[in-house]
Amino acid sequence: MTNQNVLVADTNSGLSMANSSIFTTGTQKPPAAPGGYVSISRKKLLKNMEINGGARVNAWVDSMRASSPTHMKSTPSVNEDPSSWILHHPSALEMFEQIIDASKGKQIVMFLDYDGTLSPIVDDPDRAFMSKQMRATVRKLARFFPTAIVSGRCRDKVYKFVRLAELYYAGSHGMDIQGPAKGSKYKKGSGGVVFQAASEFLPMIDEVYEELVEKTKTTPGAKVENNKFCLSVHYRCVDEKVGKWSGLAQVVKSVLKEYPKLRLTQGRKVLEIRPTVKWDKGKALEFLLESLGFANCTDVFPVYIGDDRTDEDAFKVLRERGQGFGILVSKIPKDTSASYSLQEPTQASYGFPATFGGVQTAA
Ligand SMILES: O=P(O)(O)OC[C@H]1O[C@H](O[C@H]2O[C@H](CO)[C@@H](O)[C@H](O)[C@H]2O)[C@H](O)[C@@H](O)[C@@H]1O
């Protein structure tokens, strides 16, 4: 794949996993993180968006544009021939048989991103509802397989959207994990799993939230969302043409300058601010597999469906483990470590997950 993974020295060694607040039931422990290093994809992006000195707001705005589908200029490898992208990331809908064959005799575990995967992307983040059809599909999936929602959103908020008590939820990009409220039939005790990777950051996140809300008031359309262990600064409704994106980038940059223990990543028309802990959606996936008792199993088949850059951490983990696969939901070719693709969320509802194990979707 064209995705480049780099190791960047973690200057905040005081925030290593050893210092994190970890509450687990039973004997589950988070998988070990490579000591002293943070794994970060998209070297170039990171370089452009470096927040500890030397940052150029223009580079931020370039990056904000690059992450917006209307401006999406894929890397040359993707641009050269879109049909070759499809060859490398075939539609999951057309690969049913191959996928089902590969999972035979193995325990499928489903990981589902929320925004852009289970719900359509909309202007107002508070109105990103999932359809009844999608909820029915996820409910049926969970009857057959352990199923987790892995989201950048705060766990409580994503739960309010999904409203299925039988699922695992990993909110704040995997930094806040809780097992099914109903308990789990897959592994005794795993329903009670609770894990928080960055609780010591809560006061800092709240402080930065207040500051950003105040300072973005003058940017029409900007919205700051408190996702408990991380923050989202939305610019979907900010007018790019009148230069408002750069103003917003400048505000975020100036605030973050005072908080070197926070870092910035990007999603779909959103700047994501999060602690520099070595934790992401990929680590959450590993943690959940381990909690379910599949840490060193060869007969587990994890499937992760997601649409965003932050989902790449999970796709990468699956590639590295050589188990299961990732499915990228995207209408356009993108650099990805996923193996398959779906065009849009509705395809995830009407088609792919529903076919696993002969699960039938509602008409
Ligand atoms: O990991 P996810 O579940 O995909 O969450 C990532 C972010 O999703 C939400 O923002 C995105 O969806 C919004 C609603 O459709 C849209 O308005 C926004 O532009 C998108 O970036 C959510 O609001 C963020 O907090 C999540 O971090």
Image (cartoon, rainbow, N blue to C red):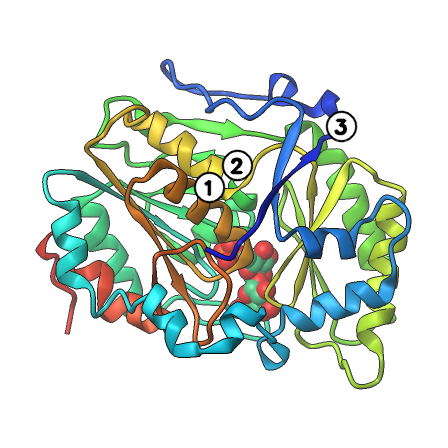
Label located before the other in sequence (3 or 1): 3
Number of the front mark, 3 or 2: 3
Q: Secondary structure at mark 1?
A: strand
Label located before the other in sequence (3 or 2): 3
Residue 176 bears which disc, if any? 2
Foreground: 137 or 89?
89
Can you say whether 47 is above or below 276 in the image?
A: below
> Residue 193's image quarter?
top left
Residue 265, position in %: x, y?
67, 52
Disc 1 packing (10 Å; few <14; some 14–19; many ≥20) = many
Residue 252 bears which disc, if any? none
Can you say whether 80 is above or below 288 in the image?
A: below
Q: Is residue 230 left or right of residue 296?
A: right
Q: Secondary structure at mark 3?
A: loop
- Residue 173 appears in the figure: yes
Identified by mark 1, the residue type is: Ala
> What residue is rendered at 32% in x and 69% in y?
87
Q: Is residue 7 left or right of residue 258?
A: left
Residue labelled with disc 1: 170
Q: Is residue 128 left or right of residue 95?
A: right
Residue labelled with disc 3: 12
Residue 329, position in %: x, y?
40, 66
Q: Quadrant of the N terminus?
A: bottom left
Residue 39, position in %: x, y?
60, 38
Q: Quadrant of the C terminus?
A: bottom left
> What residue is rendered at 50% in x and 71% in y?
78
Disc 3 packing (10 Å; few <14; some 14–19; many ≥20) = some
Dot 2 beta carbon under 8 Å from ligand 1: no
Foreground: 17 or 55?
55
